[in-house]
Amino acid sequence: MKHLRLRAFLVGALVAAALTACGGGAAGEKAGDHASETGAPEVEAVDQGVCRADATAAPDAAAGNFPAQWAFPPRTTVYHREDRQGTGVILTAVSETPFQDILDFLNQDEVRAGFKITSGETEDDDAEANWTSADYTGRWTIRKSDACPGETVLQVFAAPK
């Protein structure tokens, strides 16, 4: 039992560190439901500065150690994959879909089929949420792009359970 709690703690810590974002809310709440301060230090997700017009899709970005059923919003290009050597995978994408539309998309029950948001936080320019599924645990972050007006940067971390 202690081993399972330690593993859950370590996965949670790695999820937060992997995306360099902090935040939280009540269990079961959608990311858009919690916009107040949580007391955790606020660190924003990295804006890689790649605009969709310049983004080249990463080959096999979502292959292996990433949930095949994960849905990205329309007009989104996944351009970077980082394998955290057995800890999980981070996919970075850029989308022409506006920030609020992506937030709504990620909170749709039919899009999240099989995924449950466990906590989240939303601000004017960024949002993040922890999630879990039968086989994975992870975190997504979205933020308005600093480099590309009207575009949104997404990062999704997934770790096998």
Image (tube, helix red, strand yellow):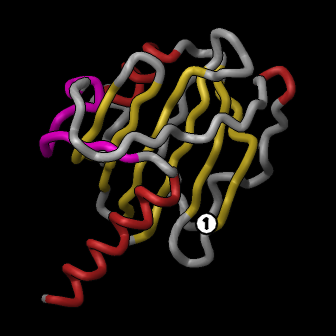
Q: Vertically, is 106 above or below 81?
A: above
Residue pictured at 27% horizontal, 72% vertical: 9
Q: Is residue 25 magenta?
A: yes
Q: Quadrant of residue 120?
A: top left
Q: Where does residue 107 sit, x and y in percent of width and height?
A: 32, 28
Compared with 90, 36 (above or below) is above
Crowding at mark 1 (Cα within 10 Å: few <14, some 14-19, many 20+): few
In the image shown, does 153 or 43 lie closer to the viewer? 43
Instruction: Where is residue 27? Give x, y as percent.
Output: 14, 45
Viewer-proximal residue, 138 or 64?
A: 138
**What residue lies at 37% left-to-right and 47% top-to-bottom?**
22
Identify whether 95 is placed above or below 83.
Answer: above
On the rendered structure, is 33 left or right of 111? Answer: left
Instruction: Specify start and end residues of the magenta stretch as a single range.
Output: 22-34
Residue 124 picture location, percent across and down = 41, 16
Vertical position of residue 62 compared to residue 124: above or below = below
**If the image is split into quadrants, where does the C terminus sit?**
bottom left
What's the amino acid at mark 1? Gly
Q: Give the residue number, with chain letter if any, for mark 1.
A: 64
